[in-house]
Image (cartoon, rainbow, N blue to C red):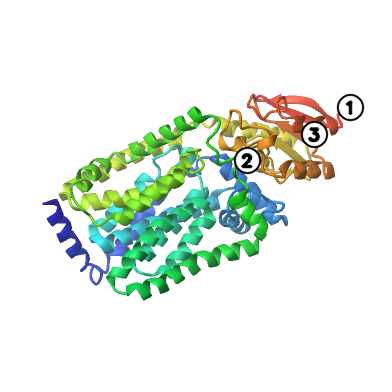
Amino acid sequence: MLVERLASTRCVATGTAPGHRTYWTRLLPALALLACATRLPSFAGPLWNPDEGYLAVQARLLADGGELYETVVDRKPPLVPWLYRAAFAVAGDESLTSVRILAIGAHLLTAVLLASLARRRWGDRAGRTAGVLYLLLSVGLNPEDAQAATFEVFMLPGTAAAVWSADRRRFGLAGTAVACAFLAKQTGGAVLVPVVWLLWGAGGAGPGPGGVRREGVRLAAGVVGPVFAAAVLTDPSGFVFWTVTGSGAYASFTGSELHVLARGLANTLLLGTACAGILPPVVRVLRVARTGAADLWLWAGSSAGAVVLGFHFFGHYFLQLTPPLALLGTVALQILPRERTVRAVLASACVCLLFVAWGLLAPRPDLAHAERLAAALQSRTAPGDRVLVWGMHPETYWLADRTPASRYLSAGLLTNFSGGRDGPRVGEEYAVPGAWRTFRAELAARPPAVVVDDSRGKPYGAGRVWGLRRVLRGGGYERVGVVGGAVVYARGVG
């Protein structure tokens, strides 16, 4: 019975394109309104997490003449720093409102692409369901992960566009979309797995082996071209180092295994709660009916592999799972009675409301600390002074409107703590290769007016990192205060 219903659904889907001219004129405003409503918490404060702060500082440095992968560095591709830089050029760099609007646009574009893909395969109702489900599911994490305008958010439209294009046999365009996803964040390249599956399946749908080879060349060109251009526009060797080869210690599973696994379990449970409305139909339907959704399962599987890659399991990594999960929920609901779709969407909407309320009401102790520290920096320095904040909250630089003394905006790049490690793989020997040599040269050339040890008992503080102690002693810094556990040192006191 379920298989017959699925077959009839596919028959309906093949005839929907010519008619229903008002379909998109009705659906687009509804999706836009829902995208804005689910992102209301994102405007509730100056920023949500250190990634936003890191990107904001990078954008300011780029505006002041900095060079990506030279004087402005991170373990990420260049697309999102460029987006922040462009948004700040248009709307100013005192607020993240402009990038929050771009993030809403990224979510809306992802929802529209998923709706278009589902409508093409399973009909009008499926298109509406897919777009709405995605927007509801995409807030189903800790607000610090779901509401922030970070790398994963701008990666999602590329992943959705890649599958959308491959589904229409536009493999050159699919390759470009894969490249855009990769250039937002490396793990976006995982969407190449379902794209290649669709390319392989295209051989039996018309073009034949020769056509598949031609489309494969187009796909490869689409992937390689933008990535090569990004490398040339930045620094080719730096691009390769910072995005691929320079993160061996960061990607290791050794150190803090229980801590990392607990984080992964917690975020899995959060996303599972957000998906509570669609999991029962998915389990019921997809175990008894062949739905022709192999590419969606591959998309979900490759995305899950991308979440696991690096063994950190931060909540924002899980956003990559939301587009394929929304489509799997959609295809399952299409072969069940219509009332099941209504119940599933209502359940997802109710859970979504809880996550939105969490975002609006949750306390923000890390932000409050960063704001107090930024105020202390402003009171002790002049606008042109350089400062060093030794910690994991680069947003302090942005909040204080002070220039970092080093290209390394977090202590993690110099100790490997940035991966959430608090065990044996934290220390100078696990830093990015060559980082300490460059770091010491930067501080010797232009010593910071103030140094803040914001480790607050973590294993990368001055008590355990000889390199930082040497900076403090050699530079003549003296302790002048404590702000929320962060120790402030000033140069040339007395």
The amino acid type found where label 2 is placed reads Glu
Residue linked to disc 2 = 395
Q: Position of residue 72 (x, y in %)?
A: 68, 51
- Label 3 to label 1: alpha-carbon separation: 19 Å
Q: How many marks?
A: 3
The front one of 99 and 344 is 344
The amino acid type found where label 1 is placed reads Gly
How crowded pointer 1 is (Cα within 10 Å; few <14, some 14-19, many 20+) is rated as few
Residue linked to disc 3 = 471
Q: Is residue 443 visible to us here?
A: yes
Choose the circle earlier in sequence order: 2 or 1.
Answer: 2
The residue shown at (78%, 37%) is 381
- Label 3 to label 2: alpha-carbon separation: 22 Å
The residue shown at (28%, 69%) is 204
Residue linked to disc 1 = 494
The residue shown at (36%, 65%) is 199
How crowded pointer 3 is (Cα within 10 Å; few <14, some 14-19, many 20+) is rated as some
- Label 2 to label 1: alpha-carbon separation: 30 Å
Name the outermost residue toward the front: 209
Task: For the residues labelled 3 and 2, say whether their Cβ atoms are less than 8 Å apart.
Answer: no
The front one of 236 and 137 is 236
Q: Secondary structure at mark 1?
A: loop
The amino acid type found where label 3 is placed reads Val
Q: Position of residue 279 (x, y in %)?
A: 27, 41
